Image: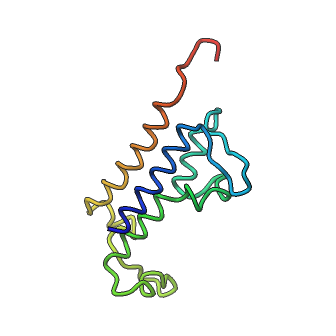
Amino acid sequence: NRWRLDFRNYETKITSAIKEKQLKKKNGESLPVTDNQGLSTLVGCLEGGGSCEDVMEDYGSIHNRFHLRLGMMGCDNKTEAWNLNRGDPTGVLWTLESSMRDPAFYRLHKAIDNIVNTYKKHLEEYSLDK
C-alpha cells in the first residue's frame, strides 16, 4: 500500500533525525531537538506547526497528513475530498466527532506516540546539575 510506505518513509526520516539529534533544513542548517525545546520542536513537526516550515517536506505534519489521507479513503475522487468549500468533508477520520469511532485513529496515534517515545529514549539522563 502506497500510503503505508509513505508513512514508513516519514517515520524512518524522523527516527533518523532523532538519532542524529537534529532535523535538517532545506538550506542545510540544522534544527536541534536536544535542547529544552526539543520535544516541542519535534511534536510541532509531527503536528504540522511550530518552527518547522523549513523541514515540513521531509519530516512534517505526519499526524495531520495521515488523518487527511485516511479520511479521503471514503471519497469517490480526490477532488471531492479536497473540496472543503462545500462544507461537507468526507471520511471518518476527517472530523474529530467521528474519528474516534475508527480503529485507524488509534493506530495512527499509537504510531505518533511511538515516535515520541523513541525521542524520549534518546534523551540523556537528568542530573541534579540541570
Number of marks drawn: 0
- In the image, 57 versus 130, the foreground residue is 57
The residue at the point 46 percent across, 41 percent down is: 116
Identify the colour scheme used. rainbow
The C terminus - image quarter: top right
Residue 20: x, y in percent? 58, 38
The N terminus - image quarter: bottom left
- In the image, 71 versus 33, the foreground residue is 33
Is the residue 6 above or below the residue 85 in the image? above
Is the residue 9 above or below the residue 34 in the image? below
Left or right of 12, for residue 58: right
Is the residue 82 above or below the residue 94 in the image? below
Left or right of 125, for residue 41: right
The residue at the point 54 percent across, 47 percent down is: 43
The picture quadrant where one finds residue 41 is: top right
The residue at the point 38 percent across, 62 percent down is: 5
Residue 50: x, y in percent? 63, 53
- In the image, 4 versus 70, the foreground residue is 4
Residue 28: x, y in percent? 72, 51
